[in-house]
Image (spheres, rainbow, N blue to C red):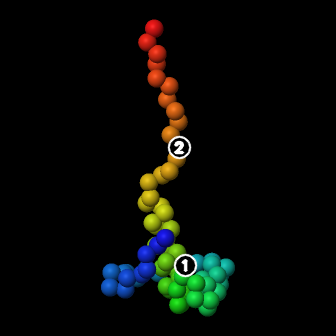
Amino acid sequence: MARAVNASASGTIEVTLSVQSKLLLQELAARGVYGRNVAEVAARFIDAALERFVEAPRLPLPRVRKAVPR
C-alpha cells in the first residue's frame, strides 16, 4: 500500500485529467477515501501507481530441462 504523503518531502506537479477522473477524485475526497481533498487523493493514487510500477516483476520463469549426458 502507498505511504502517506509527506508534506516536507513532496513536490508539486500539474496534470490534466479527464472530466470522469476528476469527478471520481472529487467523490473519493468527499467520502474521505484516500484523503481529505482532491489533491491528497490524487497524490496517493499516483504514489501507489509508481510504487507498483517499480516493483520487481512477478512472472513465473519457465522450467528449463537439463540436458541428460548420454
Residue under the image location 46 percent in, 67 percent down = 50
Q: How crowded is mark 1: few (under 14 residues within 10 Å), some or many (20 or more)?
A: few
Is residue 8 found left or right of 63 in the rendered image?
A: left
- Between the C-alphas of marks 1 and 2, the distance is 37 Å
Place of residue 24 in the rendered image (x, y in percent of width and height, measured from the top left): 64, 81
Count numbered badges in the picture: 2
Q: Looking at the picture, does residue 68 appear above or below residue 52?
A: above
Q: Nearer the viewer, residue 59 or 16?
A: 59
Q: Which of marks 1 and 2 is nearer the N terminus?
A: 1
Q: How crowded is mark 2: few (under 14 residues within 10 Å), some or many (20 or more)?
A: few
Which residue was labeled with disc 1?
16
Residue under the image location 42 percent in, 81 percent down = 5
Is residue 21 found left or right of 40 in the rendered image?
A: right
* Amino acid type indicated by mark 1: Thr
Q: In which quarter of the image is residue 38?
A: bottom right
Place of residue 30 in the rendered image (x, y in percent of width and height, measured from the top left): 61, 91
Q: Circles 1 and 2: CB distance less than 8 Å?
A: no
Disc 1, SS: loop
Which residue was labeled with disc 2?
60
Place of residue 43 in the rendered image (x, y in percent of width and height, measured from the top left): 48, 79
Residue under the image location 46 percent in, 16 percent down = 68
- Which numbered circle lies on residue 52? none
Q: Which of marks 1 and 2 is in front?
A: 2
Disc 2, SS: loop
Image quadrant holding the C terminus, namely top left
* Amino acid type indicated by mark 2: Pro
Place of residue 58 in the rendered image (x, y in percent of width and height, measured from the top left): 50, 50
